[in-house]
Image: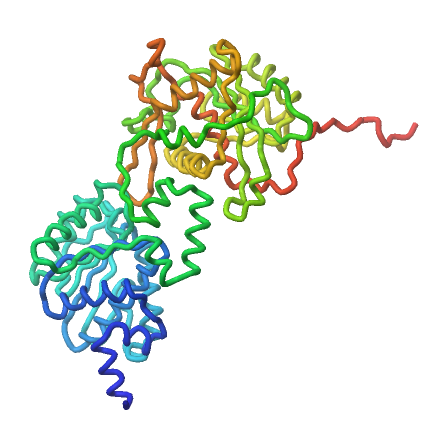
């Protein structure tokens, strides 16, 4: 076969185009989706497709190969492709770099492609436009006469798509493709998947191409090992694992501590009133006071309204470093061994008593809520325990990140409550019962958009099921602060009391 014949053959087959001209072998599930999309474009069928692949399984490479193929095939026509991403930086820019890499490597397009105005790629007369779907982006007016693509569609707002983006394909009824990974049932991706499945049932033409990590691993063993590591690290039921790797939608508003999650948290170790020799401990302190803006109640926008003051709560964890040796986890386990609570105590009393406890337990780290009133207490403790204190300030972003990390610790079996104390009236039993009451009442809400913002707290209306008293969230935030140590380099951490240096040592008289 001569060179011209080989090029013609490659332009009739996306698999040959990618492999022979770019050196990329498409996997079976990639090729199946690509062929259906290209058939609709070339035959001008105007179908809508939904492609849901797990993270890092080749979804972005698939898009770049489809785009390069159409630019090469239609280079003698006024073909126009529009591709939108949830953000300009980094998502649109990443998509442009991927396409540029494919165009520069492909034997047909290598010397033909040009970049115009910073966001347009051209081969001959055919063009692709990269646009941002951010809420503030002004993108009305572009025309997608050939293909309209939406990348990471789960993060694009529905109203933005319907009002400004979808009409771009109207004049020619161009083929539309929504790419992404599963998230909640309220996203643009989820809506289009439901509509595509309905159309698919009517005429039998496959429009939804959805796989899970289990299917992807059949064609990529290394990918399977990566997913196994993520499951070990985060837990199979972590929202990120369920959505990003197994294409399972999660509800937008659910309980933070599910029944299964609460079961994972149960441990077999006893509570402790005193530290054990050689053990490693951390203090996690949630400081009571008025509700700061970053600690907004579920359903509020962070307006800083006051609620009845909660307590200052201290959760003491023993850190089990044995799980660092687990190849899947490579992270410590946090075991609750003791709790303390102060209600209505002033800063001097809090400092004196927490400082005394720190001198007794000698914690490796002290994590403190340094938001609002906690700032002063943190300053005092930092002077007394320099190098051990970690300040945590609650904002919408930091609280969301803390929540996701706390879920990962729980779902991977690395958070354990002590077993119920023998005496039901003991302080440890009372505080543990309060913790679980707050946990069962804690709700969560996932905000739409690419930020994956998680809002979680105990609603103001929540009441204790036995006493009818208002429930706070002081115990659950105290416990969750262990997640602030998620990336701590534990190494050979040891628990030890650091004695001050003798000021007379080394002096001569």
Percent position of residue 334, x then y: 53, 32
Position of 405 compared to 85: left or right? right
Percent position of residue 382, x then y: 60, 27
Q: Is 490 above or below relative to 133?
A: above
Percent position of residue 12, x then y: 20, 77
Q: Is 296 above or below relative to 409?
A: above
Residue toward you, 492 or 99: 492
Give the quadrant of the N terminus: bottom left
The residue at 38%/35% (across/down) is 400
Q: Is 87 above or below relative to 259?
A: below
Quarter assignment of residue 34 = bottom left
The residue at 29%/55% (across/down) is 53
Using the rendered image of the protein, determine whether residue 341 is visible from the camera's viewpoint: yes
The single residue placed furthest to the right in the displayed view is 509
Give the quadrant of the C terminus: top right
Position of 485 compared to 33: left or right? right
Quarter assignment of residue 303 = top left
The residue at 33%/41% (across/down) is 452
Q: Is 160 above or below relative to 505?
A: below
**Colouring convention used in this rendered image of the protein:** rainbow
Percent position of residue 60, x then y: 31, 60
């Amino acid at each position: 076969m001569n060179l011209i014949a080989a090029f013609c053959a490659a332009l009739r087959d996306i698999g040959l185009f990618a492999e022979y001209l770019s050196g990329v072998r498409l996997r079976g599930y990639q090729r199946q989706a690509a062929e259906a999309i290209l058939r609709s474009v070339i035959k001008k069928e105007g179908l809508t497709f939904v492609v849901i692949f797990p993270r890092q399984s080749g979804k972005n490479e698939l898009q770049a190969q489809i785009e390069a193929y159409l630019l090469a095939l239609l280079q003698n026509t006024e073909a126009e492709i529009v591709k939108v991403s949830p953000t300009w930086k980094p998502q649109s820019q990443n998509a442009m770099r991927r396409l540029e890499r494919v165009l520069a490597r492909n034997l047909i397009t290598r010397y033909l492609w040009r970049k115009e105005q910073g966001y347009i790629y051209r081969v001959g007369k055919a063009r692709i436009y990269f646009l941002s779907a951010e809420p503030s982006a002004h993108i009305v007016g572009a025309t997608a006469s050939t293909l309209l693509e939406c990348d990471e569609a789960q993060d694009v707002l529905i109203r933005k798509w319907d009002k400004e983006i979808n009409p771009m394909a109207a004049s020619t009824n161009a083929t539309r493709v929504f790419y992404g990974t599963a998230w909640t049932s309220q996203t643009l991706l989820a809506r289009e998947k439901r509509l595509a499945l309905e159309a698919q049932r009517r005429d039998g033409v496959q429009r939804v191409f959805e796989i899970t990590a289990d299917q992807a691993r059949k064609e990529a063993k290394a990918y399977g090992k990566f997913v196994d590591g993520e499951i070990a690290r985060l837990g199979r039921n972590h929202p990120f694992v369920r959505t990003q790797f197994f294409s399972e939608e999660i509800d937008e508003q659910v309980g933070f501590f599910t029944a299964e999650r609460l079961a994972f948290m149960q441990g077999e170790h006893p509570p402790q009133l005193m530290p054990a020799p050689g053990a490693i401990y951390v203090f996690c302190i949630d400081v009571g006071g008025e509700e700061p803006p970053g600690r907004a109640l579920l359903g509020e926008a962070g307006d800083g309204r006051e609620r009845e003051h909660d307590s200052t709560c201290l959760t003491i964890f023993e850190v089990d470093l044995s799980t660092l040796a687990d190849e899947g986890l490579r992270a410590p386990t946090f075991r609750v061994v003791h709790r303390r609570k102060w209600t209505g105590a002033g800063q001097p009393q809090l400092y004196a008593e927490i400082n005394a406890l720190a001198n007794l337990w000698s914690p490796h780290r002290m994590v403190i809520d340094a938001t609002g009133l906690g700032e002063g207490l943190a300053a005092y403790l930092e002077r007394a325990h320099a190098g051990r204190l970690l300040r945590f300030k609650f904002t919408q972003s930091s609280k969301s990140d803390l929540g996701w990390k706390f879920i990962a610790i729980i779902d991977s079996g690395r958070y354990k409550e002590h077993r119920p104390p023998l005496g039901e009236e003991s302080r440890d039993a009372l505080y543990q019962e309060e913790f679980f009451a707050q946990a069962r009442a804690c709700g969560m809400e996932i905000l739409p958009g690419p930020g994956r913002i998680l809002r979680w707290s105990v609603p103001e209306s929540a009441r204790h099921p036995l006493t009818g008293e208002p429930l706070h969230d002081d115990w659950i935030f105290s416990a969750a602060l262990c997640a602030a140590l998620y990336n701590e380099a534990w190494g050979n951490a040891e628990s030890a009391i650091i004695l001050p240096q003798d000021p007379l040592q080394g002096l001569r008289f």
